Amino acid sequence: MKQTLASRRRASGLALTAVLALMLGLLSSAPASADPTGSGWREGWCKQGEGLTVVVDFGDGSERGWEARCKIGGTLASDGQATRKSALEAVGYEVTITNQMVSHIDGIGDELSPWWRFTTSQMAAGWLSEPFEVPAAATNWFQGACLSEAGCAPRVPPQFEPGSVDPGPTDPGPTDPTPTDPTTKATSKPKTNWVRKPTTKKAGTVRVTVPRVAGRPKASGKVVVVLKNGKKTKRVQAKLPAGRVKVKVQLPKVAKGNWKLVVRYKGDRSYRATKSTKTIKVKK
């Protein structure tokens, strides 16, 4: 009887080992997923017909620059931000909503105008001012996001992965850029020179210059100057005079300490919105 029980146990053990070996063999022979993370997206532009491309432009001053990610399949869930939030999250971005607006992407937002602006494109035919979000079935669509006080578009035009475009009639072909196309806008960061620095007793004046870019008209529009010291903020807005690239901005008196001077140019039809920063030390 003991020998019979031992034989049965050995037989059961061999059978279990065979089953485990078979399962491992099936797993190892399964084809590798096109998306090793299992998240349904990959880095880079989508191929034509592959899905939705999400382009995030973190700005000229950011080390991350701009990024393109492909949501394979292009199907999105509906959310409180239409599809803007779900499009970003579908390709791995962390999204923060403040006052029902997208204020931060991966923790990055602007200190003066923290809202992310959105634009779209279909079939890579150029960024559109409307609609701001893609449909839920978004294959061959592009969702763009960038930081700005005014409307903007990523600095790179929408495009499919090179070599994947169908040359047939569904391809709209290249479009002629126009001066009002956001993708053709030039970049010119504002520069500052002190006429008189503000003190604890007297107001100050700073001259703001938005240099002209070769082949473009002179910049126009508004500039915003902000002095920040901890929670203290002084904000002044001015407008570039017609035909001039310089404007004097009157600043109020400030308390002692180190102040951060943030100058933002809001942009116009020919120039993107940009900003520059410097530090001022007020001693008396």
Image: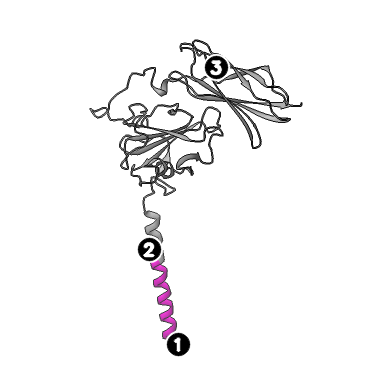
Q: Where is mark 3, residue-wise? A: 210
Q: Residue at x 54, y 14 (%)?
A: 211
Q: Residue at x 37, y 42 (%)?
A: 83
Give the magenta-colored segment's residue range.
1-19
> Which marked residue is nearer to the observer: mark 2 or mark 1?
2
Q: Name the spot of residue 183 as percent of width and height, x first.
A: 41, 23
Q: Name the spot of residue 60 as percent of width and height, x first.
A: 53, 27
> Which marked residue is nearer to the observer: mark 2 or mark 3?
3
Q: Where is mark 2, residue-wise? A: 22
Q: Residue furthest bottom?
A: 1
> Which marked residue is nearer to the observer: mark 3 or mark 1?
3
Name the dominant secondary structure of the magenta segment: helix
Image side of residue 7 versus residue 225, left or right = left
Quarter of the figure that contains the C terminus: top right
239 and 185: which is toward the camera: 239
Secondary structure beneath dot 2 equals: helix
Distance between mark 3 and mark 1 Cα atoms:
96 Å
Q: Are marks 2 and 1 in contact (CB under 8 Å)?
A: no
Q: Amino acid at mark 3?
A: Val
Q: Amino acid at mark 1?
A: Lys
Residue 2: image tag: 1
Q: Name the spot of residue 270 as percent of width and height, x first.
A: 44, 18
